[in-house]
Amino acid sequence: MILLCGIPSEAPLRMIASRLEEMSADFVLLNQRDFAKCDLWFEIESSDITGELKTQDRIFRLEDFTGIYPRLMDDRLLPELMGEADDSPLRAFCRGFHDTLIRWMEIAPACVINRCAPMASNSSKPYQAQLIRQHGFYVPETLITNDPQLVREFRKKHGRIIYKSISAIRSIVQQLDSEDEARLEQIRWCPTQFQAYVDGVDVRVHTINGEAFATAIDSDATDYRYAGQQSGRPAGLREVELCDELKQKCIGLTQSLGLEFAGIDLRITPEDEVYCFEANPSPAFSYYESHTGQPISQAVAHRLASRPFVRHEPELALMAS
Amino acid sequence: MWLVLCSSSDASAHWAFQGLLQMGLAPLQLVTAESLASARAWEHHVNSSGAHVTITLANGAVIRSSQIRGVLNRLVAPSDFTARCAVDAYRQYAAAETQAFYLSWLHALPGAVINRPAPLGLSGPWFHASEWTLRASRAGLRTCTYRQSARDSAAITDARRASFSRERTAAHHVIALHGEIFGAQVPSDVAHACGRLAKAANTRMLGLQLNSREGDEWTFADATVLPDLRAGGVPLLRRMAQILVTGEPS
C-alpha cells in the first residue's frame, strides 16, 4: 500500500497519483485539507512501529504502508484554518495531526520520498555546498558577510556577482549592480550570500531509484525560474543525456545526502566544468516533465511501488554531517 | 587556539571552560552566542577547495578558522538579536538566514569539534522523542512504549512523558563521549548500548537519561546532545581535553 499526502491538485502529487493509477497500484491519497475528518496514532514498542490512519471512510494500518510520498504544505496556512484563533481546538488538532504524521513518516519502515531529516541539509545552501564539493563537483566562489567593503572587493575580484538567500526560504537570484552596491550598508544586520557568477548552461538532474533525468535549460536570465520577468522570454527546456560519470556522481550525491529523490541544479561551463548549486529534496519535477516528457513521475511511482522495499540509506534517516 | 562556544547562561559550558583552562588547554577562548550576535564582521568563504570563516568580535578580537585546533560547541541557536533588528515582515526570513549561516560556518570549523553541527541542531542532531526511542531500542536499550496521537496536545504529550519518567524510581545521567561512558555507574551492556546509540546518531557526545528500579531494569528515558557536562566530572573533562588536543577523528 502506498500513501500520498498533500494537496491533490498540486501538479507533482497529481502526476504521481496518475502514474500509480495507470499501474493499478494500491494507494491512498490523503488530502491534508481533510484533516478534520481524519485521525492518526502510532506506537513504538521494542522497535516495532504500529498505528492507524483513519480517513473519512476507511481505516488503514500504518504498518501496511510500504511507500510514502509526502508533499505537505505548511499546515498553519491551510484555508480551513482561516479565521481560527491561535488557540482554537481545530488549529490544535490540525497541528497534532500533522505532527503525528510527520513523526511517524520520519521513522516508518517504508520507502519515504523524502524524510525530513535528510531534507534539512537544504535548509543551509552553503552547508550543503560543503557536502556537495566532497562529491567532486565544483561549487561557486561564495562569500557570506555583513561587511560591505568585503563585498566590494569580492565584486572587484570576480566582476559579475550574484546574491541570493541561503536558507530554505526561496529568493530570486539577482545580479549585484551599482544600485545594489549603494545599499550594501543594509547587510550589516544580517550576513548575506554573494557568489561569483558562473557562465554556462543550466542542467536540472532528477535522480530517483538509480536513474537520472537531465534537462538543459536555455535562458539568458540570472534565475531561469523567473526568465519571463528577468529576460522577457521564458526559458526553453530540453532533455539531455549525461555521461556515465556525471550521472553516477549525481546518484551518489543523492544517496549520500540520505535522499530517495532529488532535483540537482548544475551549471556546465564552456570549459566543461560541472558546478553544482544545490540538491533540492522536494523537487517540483512536474515543470520539467511537462516540458520534456521525461518519465520522472513514473520513476517515482515505480520506486514507491517497488517490492520488496530495499533501503538505499543507512538505518533511519542519514544525518549528513 | 581552542574555543568553547555557548550561550552566556550555559553554566555547564562555563564549568567546562574553567576546567579545561586549569588542565592547561591554551589558548582557550570562551565565545558566547550573544558576543557572536554582535560581531563586528563576518567573513565566510565556501568554494571548490574548502570553507573557512573569520569573525571579528565587537571587542576587536579576531577568530580565524585556520587557527582553530578544536571546539567545544554548545550553541543551540543564534541569538535572536539579528531577527529582532529586522522589520516585522522580514523577521522570519532573518531568523532562517541566520540559522542557515551558523550551520555552515560551524560545519567549516576544523579540528576536533564536540559536537559537530547537524541540520537538525547546531550542536548535533536534536531528534524527536519518538525517534530517540526507536534509535535507543535499536541500539539495545530497553525502552518504554512510545505512543503519539493526533488528539494529543503537546502539553498532554509532555505531561505523559514526564509521568513515564516519574514511574521509575531513580534517574541516572550518563554521557557517551567517543565510545566511552561517563557519569552514573551502569552495567557494561547498558554502557555499550549507550555508546552504540551515540554512534548511530552520528554524534560524538550524547547525554542519556536512564531510569532504573533498584539498580535493575535500566530503561532509556531521554537523550540530548547538550548534556550537563558536570555529570561526567573531571574524567569527562580529561577525555574531552585529550580529544581536543589530539584531534582524534570522530
Image (cartoon, rainbow, N blue to C red):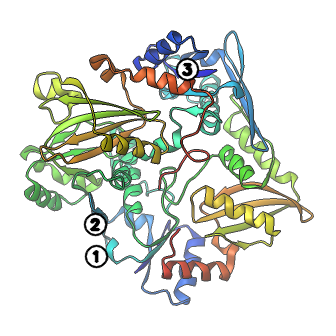
Residue to which mark 2 is pinned: B40
Residue to which mark 1 is pinned: B60
Residue A285 badge: none
Compute the Cα span from label 3 to label 2. 46 Å
Quarter of the rendering containing residue B44: bottom left
Which amino acid type is marked by label 3? Answer: Gln
Q: Is residue A62 above or below residue B117?
A: above
Q: Position of residue B60 (x, y in %)?
A: 28, 76
Compute the Cα span from label 1 to label 2. 8 Å
Q: Chain of mark 3?
A: A
Which amino acid type is marked by label 2? Answer: Arg
Q: Report the residue that reaches farthest toward the right.
A: B214
Q: Report the residue that reaches farthest toward the front.
A: A244
Q: Residue at x 44, y 64 (%)?
A: B33
Of marks 1 and 2, which one's residue comes earlier in the chain?
A: 2
Q: Position of residue A152 (x, y in %)?
A: 11, 57
Q: Is residue A248 left or right of residue A13?
A: left
Q: Is residue B89 above or below residue A4?
A: below
Q: Is residue A206 left or right of residue B178?
A: left
**Mark 3 and 1 residues: CB-CB less than 8 Å, in contact?**
no
Q: Chain of mark 2?
A: B
Mark 1 falls on what kind of element? loop
Q: Is residue B191 above or below residue A255?
A: below
- Alpha-carbon neighbours of circle 1 within 10 Å: few (<14), some, or many (≥20)? few
Mark 3 falls on what kind of element? helix
Q: Nearer the viewer, residue A99 or A273?
A: A273
Q: Chain of mark 1?
A: B
**Mark 1 and 2 residues: CB-CB less than 8 Å, in contact?**
yes
Compute the Cα span from label 3 to label 1. 52 Å
Q: Residue at x 62, y 22 (%)?
A: A90
Residue A32 badge: 3
